[in-house]
Image: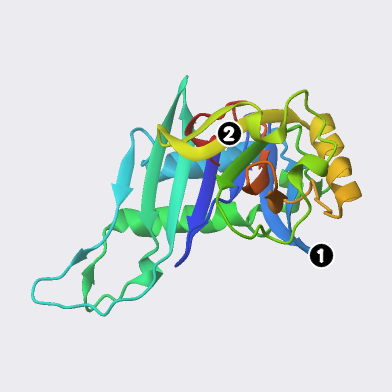
Amino acid sequence: MIRVTSCDDVCVANPGTTILADGRAIWMSQGPAGMVLSERTLTPSGLQIVRDAIDATGLFEADGSYWPTVKPGKDPPGHGIKSYGFRASRGDAFVIVGAADPESFEDDYWDIPAQMYVLADLGTKLSDPLAWLPADAWADTRRTHEAGAYLLIVTAQRFAGDRPPYPDVDAVHWPFPSSIDAIGVPYTVQGRIVENSRCQPITRRLAAELAAAELAAGYERSLADTYTEFSYSWARGPGSVDVTVRLLLPDQPLTCLDGGAW
């Protein structure tokens, strides 16, 4: 139904918070060992609170982008900013809305549109649904989200000279019929093929087999992490191979198009 991600000074791919039409809420939260994806199910009335908050903004009927403009005659100092990105379902399509966080900008220098305050408020609420929604909005208890699918991304770089001091990629017993550097299909981001990279969606079972093979080679990959990357030496290249596993959320298509982005 809706996903929100936020970016600070340096923006990297992150799953943010997703609330699905069936009431499942999936969001990043602090766990004993660091940030983890939590999952909990909303009651029908709890889900309606979320729907009402989205509709109350009046900003999700069409794509939109809301950013401040510099006031005439002002020269604002440079600094980092925070922003929000929303992806909301509307019928059979999606609406994409982006906005900067007004707290990143000084009123003395910037004209800040009212929509930024509205979207920042919604983004803050969605980012921590436990803090926002009442106890009776939930139908069950919080649990760690277990993904059903992942995106495997392999980037092979050929170069002369010394190879990195990592395990050789061909020494790993990968659970694939082909060599790891030849798996899947070319990987694309924003419609462009990423040079030297290939990609394949994999099930949780296959991801577990991959992690077991890597453990035997000395790498411990956690399937609970949203994004993990290990580097290997590549004698056959010669060069190096990076093997990335990215968790896919339930509403994401099993595709390598557009980077499988959250």
Residue 233: percent from left, percent from top: 70, 52
Residue situated in front as seen by the camera: 68 or 42: 68
Residue 146: percent from left, percent from top: 80, 40
Which residue position holds label 2? 198
Looking at the image, which residue is at 81% across and 65% down?
33
Residue 5: percent from left, percent from top: 52, 51
Element on which disc 1 rests: loop
Looking at the image, which residue is at 56% across and 55% down?
125
Assess disc 2: are there few (<14), some (14-19) or many (≥20) residues with their C-alpha within 10 Å of its C-alpha. many
Colour scheme employed for the rendering of this structure:
rainbow
Residue placed furthest toward the left: 73
Residue situated in front as seen by the camera: 188 or 113: 188
Residue situated in front as seen by the camera: 247 or 143: 247
Question: In this orientation, does residue 148 appear?
Answer: yes
Residue placed furthest toward the top: 92
In the image: residue 69, left or right of residue 11: left
Residue situated in front as seen by the camera: 171 or 66: 171
Residue 118: percent from left, percent from top: 39, 55
Quarter of the picture containing the C terminus is top right
Please name the amino acid that badge 1 sits on.
Ala
Which numbered disc, 2 or 1, marks the residue closer to the eye? 2
Which residue position holds label 1? 33
In the image: residue 208, left or right of residue 225: right
